[in-house]
Image (cartoon, rainbow, N blue to C red):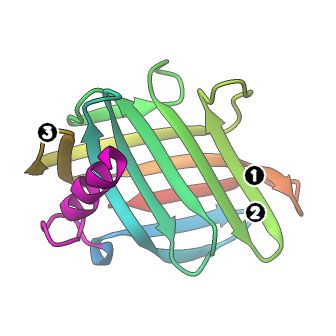
């Protein structure tokens, strides 16, 4: 039940019934091992108080199974969060035309690969409940994903939200 309520807070904050950022203001551009410009699906940004982290995440429209997820320690605030800061975790996976790229940073039991910089320019609280806070946010992400299969080329990902 707690997970469902937390998910509802995050979704409401990011284009659901609570307002906030919508997918129309969200664009993902790929270059390097694959190219193209894509919209976002299921864009979310919200703080979960029980785990003391904020998740910023999205799917990639037209690329089934592709996703971006960044967990920032504590409530979200304007600033830059990177793979080198020691507290931000991230997982990303992009599949296109038989090729797959991934990024994993600070995953329990795993080896880090890939780099990213999340730049949060504006944060507005949209929803507050006993389990968390939903945000409308503005900023961008630059990431380099490494090849998993079908290619030896890295993938550059730029996300405007």
Separation of disc 2 and disc 1 at Cα?
6 Å
Q: Is residue 49 magenta?
A: no
Is mark 2 in CB contact (under 8 Å) with mark 1? yes
Residue ID at (49%, 58%): 158
Residue 94, image x and y in percent? 66, 62
- Indicate the secondary structure of the residue bearing disc 2: loop
Q: Does 94 sit left or right of 153 as displayed?
A: left
Is mark 3 in CB contact (under 8 Å) with mark 2? no
Q: Residues within 10 Å of mark 2 (few under 14, many from 20)?
A: some
Residue matched to label 2: 33
**Closer to the camera, 49 or 41?**
49
Q: Does 125 sit left or right of 88 as displayed?
A: left
**Above or below, 36 relative to 89:** below
**Closer to the camera, 29 or 108?**
108
Residue matched to label 1: 154
Sequence-wise, which precedes: disc 2 or disc 1? 2
Determine which of the numbered discs, if any, sits on residue 23 in the image: none
Residue ID at (59%, 26%): 106
Separation of disc 3 and disc 2 at Cα?
43 Å
Residue matched to label 3: 130
Residue 50, image x and y in percent? 30, 29
Residue 48, image x and y in percent? 29, 37
Residue 137, image x and y in percent? 22, 53
Which quarter of the picture shows residue 95?
bottom right
């Amino acid at each position: 039940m707690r997970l469902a309520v937390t998910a509802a807070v995050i979704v409401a904050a990011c284009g659901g019934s609570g307002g906030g950022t919508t997918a129309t203001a969200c664009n993902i551009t790929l270059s390097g091992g694959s190219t193209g410009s894509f919209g976002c699906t299921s864009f979310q940004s919200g703080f979960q108080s029980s785990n003391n982290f904020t998740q910023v995440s999205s799917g990639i429209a037209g690329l089934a199974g592709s996703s971006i997820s960044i967990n920032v320690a504590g409530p979200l605030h304007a600033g830059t969060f990177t793979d080198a800061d020691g507290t931000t975790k991230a997982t990303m996976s992009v599949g296109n035309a038989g090729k797959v790229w991934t990024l994993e940073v600070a995953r329990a039991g795993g080896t880090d690969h890939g780099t990213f910089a999340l730049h949060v320019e504006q944060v507005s609280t949209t929803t507050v409940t006993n389990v968390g806070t939903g945000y409308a946010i503005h900023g961008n992400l630059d990431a380099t994903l490494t090849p998993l299969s079908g290619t030896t080329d890295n993938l550059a990902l730029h996300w405007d939200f």
